[in-house]
């Protein structure tokens, strides 16, 4: 007797075997590629977190010998070299007269002599120096063509000079010297803004703790208000944007340095990285020599010379 099995029963049996057997079959989406042969059980490492682009690094040479003014209009700050590697500053700060606060006053904090600038490493993304004046310590962060001055006391009182001065703020060029550079400054601002945005993205990618993520978000929100507070008094800031650009570059460098420390890498400014030697040009790709120009036709002797020789 010949045994016959309905086709439907065979179909259900095959489906049951597929479910009960090893889970080798996978759902393949259209245009999807499976693992390479022999790599089915290999676990791939997660992608490395993104790195922000390199920021523009400020150097002391950008301020040497230049006259800087608080908010581009007050006082006077000149930074010069002292010896092979030292720096010194002549600083005239402005403020209010102690005996009559309605009157303004100016005071040379060095008494007519340059003040020594003591290096204290890098802080907040810039080379930092201290000017140790009795009763008025000042910190100077070197930016590109500017100096960010801070004082823990905000204002310094000099009874002997009948003057109360405040040197805190951004010291930079006058607006007249900046308006012609507005396009270049705007380009620097765009680059710095991009570095700041990408740096915050990199920080979020490296942070898993929810509370730390909230702190980073608050820090990002506070940056804009801090920049506005710093630069609202700079002369004609709306025309050239110098203060906001330099403040943004400072934040960009600070964030990139911070990310480098999180990754266990040493922060090396782009300007000091060794350049790789350029490979020699391929012989076939060298520019062909220009074609030899045709010799000019022989110059015919003018009739004036002929007559001159004839009657000589």
Image (spheres, grey):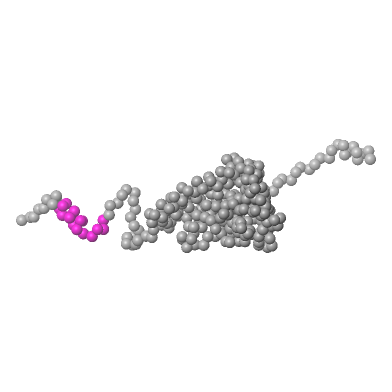
Using the rendered view, name the quadrant where residue 203 is placed.
bottom left
- In the image, 67 versus 130, the foreground residue is 130
The segment highlighted magenta reads 10-25
Residue located at (44% from left, 50% from top) = 218
User: Quarter holding the C terminus?
Assistant: top right
Is residue 44 in the magenta section? Answer: no
- Place of residue 282 in the rendered image (x, y in percent of width and height, measured from the top left): 58, 57
- In the image, 47 versus 4, the foreground residue is 47
Q: Is residue 290 visible?
A: no
- Place of residue 157 in the rendered image (x, y in percent of width and height, measured from the top left): 62, 53
User: Quarter holding the N terminus?
Assistant: bottom left
Is residue 13 in the magenta section? Answer: yes
Q: Is residue 232 above or below residue 128?
A: above
- In the image, 229 versus 189, the foreground residue is 229
Q: Is residue 29 above or below residue 87?
A: above
- In the image, 254 versus 151, the foreground residue is 151
Total labels drawn: 0
Q: Residue furthest front?
A: 99
Q: Residue furthest right?
A: 312
Residue located at (46% from left, 47% from top) = 221
- Place of residue 235 in the rendered image (x, y in percent of width and height, measured from the top left): 61, 42
Q: Is residue 195 above or below residue 116?
A: above
Residue located at (66% from left, 60% from top) = 116
Q: Is residue 49 visible?
A: yes
Residue located at (61% from left, 53% from top) = 156
- Place of residue 269 in the rendered image (x, y in percent of width and height, measured from the top left): 56, 58
The dominant secondary structure in magenta is helix
Using the rendered view, name the quadrant where residue 26 is placed.
bottom left
Using the rendered view, name the quadrant where residue 34 is placed.
bottom left
């Amino acid at each position: 007797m010949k045994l016959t099995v309905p086709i439907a029963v065979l179909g259900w049996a095959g489906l049951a075997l597929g479910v009960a057997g090893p889970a080798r079959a996978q759902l393949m989406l259209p245009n999807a590629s499976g693992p390479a042969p022999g790599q089915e059980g290999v676990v791939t490492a997660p992608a490395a977190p993104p790195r922000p682009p390199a920021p523009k690094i400020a150097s002391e040479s950008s301020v040497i010998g230049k006259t800087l003014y608080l908010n581009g209009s007050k006082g006077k700050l000149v930074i010069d070299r002292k010896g092979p590697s030292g720096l010194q500053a002549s600083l005239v700060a402005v403020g209010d007269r102690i005996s009559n606060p309605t009157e303004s006053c100016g005071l040379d904090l060095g008494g007519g002599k340059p003040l020594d600038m003591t290096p204290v490493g890098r802080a907040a993304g810039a080379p930092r120096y201290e000017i140790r004046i009795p009763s008025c310590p000042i910190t100077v962060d070197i930016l590109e063509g500017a100096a960010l001055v801070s004082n823990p006391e905000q204002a310094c009182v000099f009874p002997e000079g009948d003057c109360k001065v405040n040197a805190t703020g951004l010291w930079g060029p006058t607006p007249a010297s900046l308006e012609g550079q507005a396009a270049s400054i705007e380009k620097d601002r765009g680059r710095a803004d991009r570095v700041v945005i990408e740096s915050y993205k990199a920080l979020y990618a490296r942070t898993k703790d929810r509370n730390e993520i909230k702190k980073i978000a608050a820090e990002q929100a506070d940056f804009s208000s801090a920049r506005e507070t710093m630069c609202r008094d700079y002369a004609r800031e709306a025309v050239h944007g110098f203060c906001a650009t330099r403040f943004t570059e400072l934040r960009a460098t600070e964030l990139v340095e911070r990310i480098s420390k999180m990754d266990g890498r040493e922060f090396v400014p782009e300007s000091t990285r060794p350049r790789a030697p350029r490979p020699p040009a391929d012989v076939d790709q060298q520019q062909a020599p220009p074609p030899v120009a045709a010799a000019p036709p022989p110059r015919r002797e003018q009739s004036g010379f002929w007559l001159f020789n004839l009657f000589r």
